[in-house]
Amino acid sequence: MKKEIVILANSQRPGGRCVAGICLESGEWIRPIYEDESKQNAISKKEVQHIGLLKIIKINLLENRPETKYQRENYFIDTTKNDNWEIIGTKNLHDIEQFCEQDSQILHSNEEYTEPADMENLEPKEWKSLMLVRKNVEFKNIKIEFPGGFKKKWYGVFNDEPKMELPVTDPYAKHMLYQNPNKRTGNYLMAISLGEPYYKGRCYKFIASVLDFRTQE
């Protein structure tokens, strides 16, 4: 099946990129992934680095869905077609605001993570791992300890409720934050993504994109 998607995230992840957007026909979130398990749901950077936020792409998806835990937005890419990732247009930020959600929680909790046990209390059709929010946020470059040393990472600190501090995985946003200190505080439209169970079995949240930065070049 062929879908037209406006891209709202093209973020870094182990093994490549995580690309996601909203289907223009149905309004549903879609995260295309490959059926090849060796790719671990990552899309190669080379394949999608040309696709900017707010671009409309055409992609072919399979009817059968992956069984990724809690990420019901995942669809397998139909690799028998040769016109995947074709850019066919662009949306403006105003068009996207309609998809912004005002839930009291962000992806099922008020923490930087969501407990799988809380997800299990919901019907699978209620699971969601992608969400568009507009928040007052301050971005900070924080030194984090890793095995063998320290590394600086960008985090977004929400000043609105629910307050949380989330890592930034949008490569373009990180570039903008390094180059433009005046952009490190503001009211921004962001795509939030929820990962698969990881440390302590929790599903952690990420700022997968800061969409306003694409309109401020």
Image (tube, helix red, strand yellow):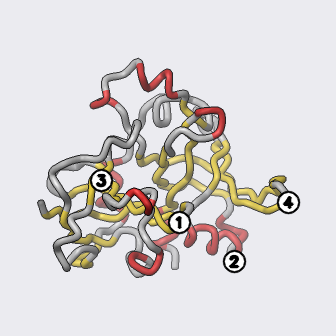
Q: Which label lies toward us, 3 or 2?
A: 3
Dot 3 surroundings within 10 Å: few (below 14), some, or many (20 or more)? Answer: many
Q: Tell me the CA gap for discs 3 and 2.
A: 31 Å
Q: Tell me the CA gap for discs 4 and 2.
A: 22 Å
Of the image marks 1 and 4, the number of the one nearer the N terminus: 1
- The dot on residue 30 is 3
Q: Is residue 199 left or right of residue 75?
A: right
Q: Residue furthest left?
A: 1
Amino acid under disc 1: Gly
Q: Position of residue 193 (x, y in %)?
A: 48, 48
Q: Nearer the viewer, residue 7 or 94?
A: 7
Q: Nearer the viewer, residue 103 or 216?
A: 103
Q: Secondary structure at mark 1?
A: loop
Q: Tell me the CA gap for discs 3 and 1.
A: 19 Å
Q: Tell me the CA gap for discs 3 and 4.
A: 35 Å
Of the image marks 3 and 4, the number of the one nearer the N terminus: 3
Amino acid under disc 3: Ile
Q: Secondary structure at mark 4?
A: strand
User: Circle 4 sits on which residue?
Assistant: 150
Q: Tell me the CA gap for discs 1 and 2.
A: 26 Å
Q: Position of residue 175 (x, y in %)?
A: 63, 74
Q: Secondary structure at mark 3?
A: strand
Figure disc tally: 4
User: Circle 1 sits on which residue?
Assistant: 15
Q: Which label lies toward us, 4 or 2?
A: 4
- Asked if the residue under mark 2 is in contact with the one under mark 4, i.e. CB atoms within 8 Å, the reply is no
Q: Which label lies toward us, 3 or 1?
A: 1
User: Circle 2 sits on which residue?
Assistant: 179
